[in-house]
Image (cartoon, rainbow, N blue to C red):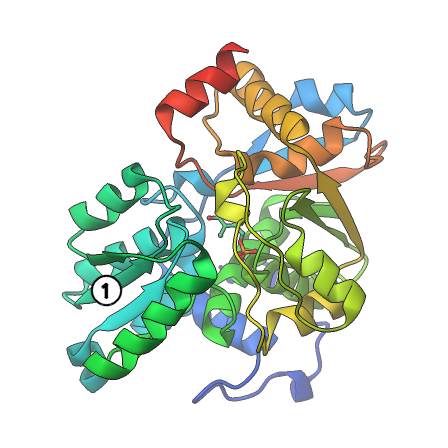
Amino acid sequence: MNRCLPTRWTSSSIRRVHGMKEVTIASVFEASRRIYPTVRHTPLLDSEYFTSLLYAERIAFKAEMFQETGSFKERGAANRILSLSDEQKERGVITFSTGNHGRAVASVASRNNIKAVVCVSKRVPSYRVEAMKALGAEVVQDGDSQDEAELIYERLKKERNLIPVVPFDDPYVVSGQGTISLELYQQLEGLDTLIVPLSGGGLLAGTAFTIKQLKPSVQVIGVSIECSPVMLRSVEEGKPVQIAESDTLADSLLGGIGMENHYTLDLVSRFVDTHVVVNEEETATAMRALYQNMGLVVEGAGSVPLAAALSGKLDLKGKHAALVCTGRNVDFNQYRRVIEE
Ligand SMILES: *Cc1c(COP(=O)(O)O)cnc(C)c1O
């Protein structure tokens, strides 16, 4: 990771990260020292097909679905869990999740012999629940939404004295996700555009913050889904808002940002240049296109950057763009229907 480290930032931006209270470029480098090899460096996959289709200079996909549990969530989860004290590890960890974060926490915890409890709502599909159980986590499934699952999590956390590993609004998690940009900076020379799915914003906050420290000229674009653009509306309002959940192909993008959001709303507001919203049809088109042209199985949430590009809502002419394919955890029957359409 130490090849061609930039020298741009000043020493004042490098702070000690004991009891980390904020995300700094130092905390992202700290994460990169902590999380490998628990977490993989993922490949950057170039596509001549999409490059010419979009009149771009270079279109490349950051293949985060190739992480062990099928999503980038392992980065943040590993950074949080591996930074715990022995006493905290002994107590065990707890989280709430639409699936991929829970699965990442279950995996990192089990590999380090730490007990994990995951709270999920009744909306979370059974194949995701089974995956977490298979990794040895205790799964508590109750409540009709992510926000209700969060209330159950709050109660169990206190009752059982467990250590929280939250899905996005935590400086360790944001710093862990930021390591994607450290890799991209080295993988894609001439990078000028970074396109990232957006839900709770841990991924977008971490990647946007980090790439702006390394190369401020990179344009960072967040992509939300039409049925649940919670962070985008919150950025517009200047405070967290709530939106009722509905069914979507991009189920990993469901969930609120927390009415007491401390980190991601602020970072997304400050470091993201552009927001795009895509609908279900555009998401399905992108999932098919990734399968047909790249041979990649990417879930709806991970396909929204390409959906934004293919929909014509973004102009990538002449750009060197990295699109983050965030995950591959699909319900197979639903996926087959989308691909066969
Ligand atoms: C969690 C997740 C996202 C969104 O990440 P946030 O940090 O919540 O914005 C995108 N894609 C996949 C596959 C995810 O699991």
Foreground of the two, 17 or 339 = 339
Tell me what residue is drawn at x 18 percent, y 64 percent: 112
Tell me what residue is drawn at x 60 percent, y 19 percent: 289
Tell me what residue is drawn at x 74 percent, y 32 percent: 309
Left-right relation of 175 to 12: left
Q: Let me know if residue 275 appears in the view.
A: yes
| Residue 93, quarter of the rendered image | bottom left
Mark 1 belongs to which amino acid?
A: Val
Foreground of the two, 166 or 151 = 151
Left-right relation of 259 to 159: right
Foreground of the two, 297 or 119 = 119
Left-right relation of 125 to 146: left
Tell me what residue is drawn at x 29 percent, y 69 percent: 94
Q: Point out residue 65 in the picture as x, y percentages from the top left corner.
A: 44, 39
Q: Point out residue 324 in the picture as x, y percentages from the top left corner.
A: 58, 43
Location of the C terminus (image quadrant): top right
Q: Point out residue 118 in the picture as x, y percentages from the top left corner.
A: 28, 61
Foreground of the two, 143 or 124 = 143
| Residue 46, quarter of the rendered image | top right
Measured along the vertical axis of the image, is residue 308 above or below residue 135? Answer: above
Dot 1 lies on which element? strand
Q: Which residue is mark 1?
A: 117
